[in-house]
Amino acid sequence: MSERPDSQPDAHQPGAQQPDAPQPDDRRPRSVYGVGSDPDVRFSLANERTALAWVRTGLALVAGGVALTTLAALADLPWVIDAVALVACLAGGLLAASALFSWRRAERALREGRSLPAPAALPWLVGGVVVLALVLAAYAVFELVGDL
């Protein structure tokens, strides 16, 4: 009945902790943190910084849209400016939402050891900027020719 001095407490006793046992993960969203294993923290933080940069870009689009519509109202500018402001505000909101979904997809891929997915919002954002530039250039030419 003698107890060995170097014996460890029984891991099944209440209050005993196992250092190598996985701890339950209660982080949210569960769809991300409930799968795979924790990646290198540098990659996870880089993914978060990228998502925050996309959110900042979306916020800048919304702020630019608000500024344009305010300027259009104060200076009695044509309806095209209001249309551009509307598109900027909507694109900013969509871009911010897309940042969340892209972060989730990339974080899951990191946790599961898969290749990172291709960026979903980037082609749409670039295409939108090109289309907007072409529409505004056509409008400027139309206004210039109309003034002659």
Image (cartoon, rainbow, N blue to C red):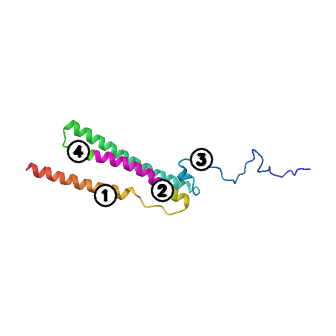
Whole-number angstrom distance, CA of label 1 to CA of label 2: 22 Å
The residue where tag 4 is placed is: 81
Residue 26: assigned label: 3
User: What secondary structure is found at the residue carrying circle 1?
Assistant: helix
The residue where tag 1 is placed is: 127
Residue 120 % position (x, y): 40, 58
Among the two numbered marks 1 and 2 on one chain, the one whose residue lies closer to the N terminus: 2
Residue 121 % position (x, y): 38, 55
Whole-number angstrom distance, CA of label 3 to CA of label 2: 19 Å
Which one is closest to the eye, mark 1 or mark 3?
A: 3
Residue at left offset 17%, top offset 51%: 140
Q: Relative to residue 142, is residue 71 drawn left or right?
A: right
Per the rendered image, the range of residues in magenta is 86-105
Among the two numbered marks 1 and 3 on one chain, the one whose residue lies closer to the N terminus: 3
Whole-number angstrom distance, CA of label 2 to CA of label 4: 35 Å
Whole-number angstrom distance, CA of label 3 to CA of label 4: 47 Å
Q: Amino acid at mark 3?
A: Asp
Among the two numbered marks 3 and 4 on one chain, the one whose residue lies closer to the N terminus: 3
User: What secondary structure is found at the residue carrying circle 3?
Assistant: loop
User: What secondary structure is found at the residue carrying circle 4?
Assistant: helix
Q: Relative to residue 105, is residue 27 drawn left or right?
A: right
Q: Nearer the viewer, residue 6 or 27?
A: 27
Q: Is residue 43 above or below residue 72?
A: below
Looking at the image, the residue that sits furthest to the bottom is 115
Q: Amino acid at mark 4?
A: Ile
Among the two numbered marks 1 and 4 on one chain, the one whose residue lies closer to the N terminus: 4
Prevailing secondary structure class for the magenta stretch in the rendered image: helix
Q: Relative to residue 73, is residue 17 drawn left or right?
A: right
Q: Amino acid at mark 2?
A: Arg
Among the two numbered marks 2 and 4 on one chain, the one whose residue lies closer to the N terminus: 4
Residue 11: assigned label: none
Among the two numbered marks 3 and 2 on one chain, the one whose residue lies closer to the N terminus: 3
